[in-house]
Amino acid sequence: MRFPPGFRFGMATSAYQIEGAFDVGGKAPSIWDTFTALPGTVRHGEDGRVGIDHYHRYAEDVEHIAAAGVRDYRFSISWTRALADPGFYDRLVDALLAAGVRPVPTLYHWDLPQDLEDQGGWLNRDTAYRLADYAGVVVRRLGDRVRDWITMNEMNVQTLYGYALTDHAPARGLGLEALPVAHHQLLAHGLAVQALRAGDAGAVGIANQHFPVYPASDDPADAFAAELFRGLTNWTFSDPILLGDYPDEMIRAGVGTSGAQLDRDLELIAAPLDFYGVNFYEPTAIEAPRAGKDYSGVLEVDIPEGLPFSPVPVKSDERTDFGWAIVPGALTEILVALRDRYPGLPPVIVTENGASFHDAAPDPSGRVRDPRRIAYLDAHLRAVEAAIDSGVRVDGFYVWSAFDNFEWAAGYDERFGLVHVDRETLARTRKDSWYWYRDLIAAHHNSGG
Ligand code: FCB
């Protein structure tokens, strides 16, 4: 594999998934603290109260990150922690810089303060302004050392899983009535860009999840359903940023803001970015709901009845242990599709890609063999290389994740880490994939990259 000089290899995590210390330093609860405390929300009833105790073990964790030779570390800032106990992020940022790693914080990775949820959460336009206030506080605190910023993570997943369905916090189950959540998060992004620029940020981007959506058959009804789903889960979250409008009239009407205010919002949302983050895991297949067919249990997520599309499993020979289809070519495909759709697409960074395999505990010699993760990452990096060869400008790739961590509603069974974390002792062990990634980065540098 060959990547352009200066290519930014990195690793990614998020606050709620690793930090723990859920109430240390006066940190107020987020919607994930509330959601995980409810019965039946998370597999095995697990939660992020302790996480992998990154809050207390950050110094060791920075060593695992830096020793791999990565240039960038993407983490997220917990909104409620940053307001109560910002010193933690000072320490983390200082440790990263001292180790030669560039900090790339995400302002918002799904952990909305619970008190804002109590006031309507992302259904309330005011939440966008509260996020901008918080962005201002954080950039004033860290902006002398942090140059690169990501505003929001996967607004589509929070809208869909958290507000349209009930799989994630805050579990509202509103179906298509969740569309205003998309608009308010996009507005929050636009306002945060403004606040970061006012704070003299170096580079500002976003991390959006994207994936190809395939119709399940040649039936025109399936093509129509897939087009609708593609618009709602992909373009709704990128067109406003990169084209200044929603993908179609139905969505425009559904976001609940209209007229001159919508025009002003869209202008703000479309402010230029320095990079565009793409999180990629797997493609989706969609069919038009077949009368009389029972879709319950078809996927791990239950889609309410009455929606005009039904996700069905993607045909694929290989799956991760999380059940996600392994289709590396779909990463090339979506990167090329983004380039073709958006003439002004900023340089892309793949801000998340990786796989959960249920790795065995370290063997007596301390080794964790994870050949399937290596194969997965190798294939996806080659897919990025293919996109670059097709003329897409991709400036970096961040592995999800640096460490095994709390995988939201799936709890701790799912292991995405390059570093293994023992659930009992919380001991960290570098997996074979960590060494593979280190060697790949070193080879890149040795060949002049
Ligand atoms: C993404 C999330 C990230 C992680 C991976 C596996 O959707 O952004 O936090 O859970 O999936």
Image (tube, helix red, strand yellow):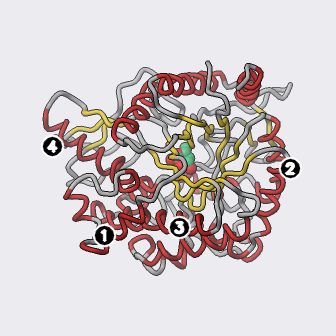
Q: Quadrant of residue 421?
A: top right
* Residue type at numbered disc 4: Gly
Residue pointed to by mark 4: 292
Taking the image as shown, residue 215 lies to the left or right of residue 193, namely left
Whole-number angstrom distance, CA of label 2 to CA of label 4: 61 Å
Give the mark, 3 or 2, whose residue is nearer the N terminus. Answer: 2
Residue closest to the eye, 282 or 320: 282
Secondary structure, mark 2, is: helix
Whole-number angstrom distance, CA of label 3 to CA of label 2: 29 Å
Residue pointed to by mark 1: 262
In the rendered image of this protein, does residue 294 appear above or below residue 382? below
The picture places residue 293, in percent across and down from the top left corner, at 19, 40
Secondary structure, mark 4, is: loop
Residue 341 visible, this orientation: yes
Give the mark, 2 or 4, whose residue is nearer the N terminus. Answer: 2
Residue closest to the eye, 304 or 436: 436
* Residue type at numbered disc 2: Ala
Whole-number angstrom distance, CA of label 2 to CA of label 1: 44 Å
Residue at screen point 40% across, 29% down: 333
Secondary structure, mark 3, is: helix
Residue closest to the eye, 77 or 16: 77
* Circle 1/circle 3 CB separation < 8 Å: no
Residue at screen point 21% across, 28% down: 217
The picture places residue 301, in percent across and down from the top left corner, at 39, 48
* Circle 2/circle 4 CB separation < 8 Å: no
Residue pointed to by mark 3: 194
Give the mark, 1 or 4, whose residue is nearer the N terminus. Answer: 1
Q: Which mark is residue 98?
A: 2
Whole-number angstrom distance, CA of label 1 to CA of label 3: 17 Å
Q: Quadrant of residue 362?
A: top right
* Circle 3/circle 2 CB separation < 8 Å: no
